[in-house]
Image (tube, rainbow, N blue to C red):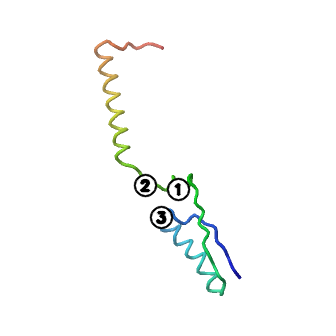
């Protein structure tokens, strides 16, 4: 019998790969033909992309600069504490 296994096994963790291997190995041991059908979704793939560290550093740096500028302008009197 031919068996197709639909899976998302290209994740960045070992358990997804081991689970896919186990799903193929058991039917093969029973003399069945097995085949992977890799489910590729841009939404799922974006969850498993590596973190872009330089962009995070840039965002934190920009946030710190903005906080510094707000505090500086408040101290110099350019910005007043108001409701609006």
To which residue does mark 3 refer?
Answer: 13
At mark 1, the secondary structure is: helix
Residue 5 on image: x %, y % = 64, 71
Q: Is residue 65 above or below residue 40?
A: above
* Distance (Cα) linking label 3 and label 1: 13 Å
11 left or right of 37? left
To which residue does mark 1 refer?
Answer: 45
Name which quarter of the figure residue 8 lies in: bottom right
Quadrant of image for the N terminus: bottom right
Mark 2 nearby-residue class (10 Å; few <14, some 14–19, many ≥20): few
Looking at the image, tell me whether mark 3 or mark 1 is earlier in sequence order. 3
Mark 1 nearby-residue class (10 Å; few <14, some 14–19, many ≥20): some
Residue drawn at (36%, 33%), measured in percent from left and top?
Answer: 63
Q: Which mark is residue 81?
A: none
At mark 3, the secondary structure is: loop
Name which quarter of the figure residue 74 lies in: top left
Residue 59 on image: x %, y % = 37, 38
* Distance (Cα) linking label 2 and label 3: 12 Å
Residue drawn at (57%, 72%), measured in percent from left and top?
Answer: 20
Which is in the foreground here, disc 2 or disc 3?
Answer: 2
Mark 3 nearby-residue class (10 Å; few <14, some 14–19, many ≥20): few
Residue drawn at (56%, 55%), measured in percent from left and top?
Answer: 44
To which residue does mark 2 refer?
Answer: 50
In front here: 8 or 67?
Answer: 8
């Amino acid at each position: 019998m031919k068996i197709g296994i639909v899976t998302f096994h290209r994740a960045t963790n070992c358990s997804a790969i081991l689970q896919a291997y186990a799903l193929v190995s058991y039917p093969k041991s029973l003399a069945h033909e097995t085949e992977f059908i890799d489910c590729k979704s841009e939404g799922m793939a974006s969850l498993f992309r590596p973190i872009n560290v330089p962009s995070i550093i840039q965002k934190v740096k920009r946030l710190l600069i903005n906080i510094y500028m707000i505090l500086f302008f408040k101290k110099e009197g350019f910005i007043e504490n108001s409701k609006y």
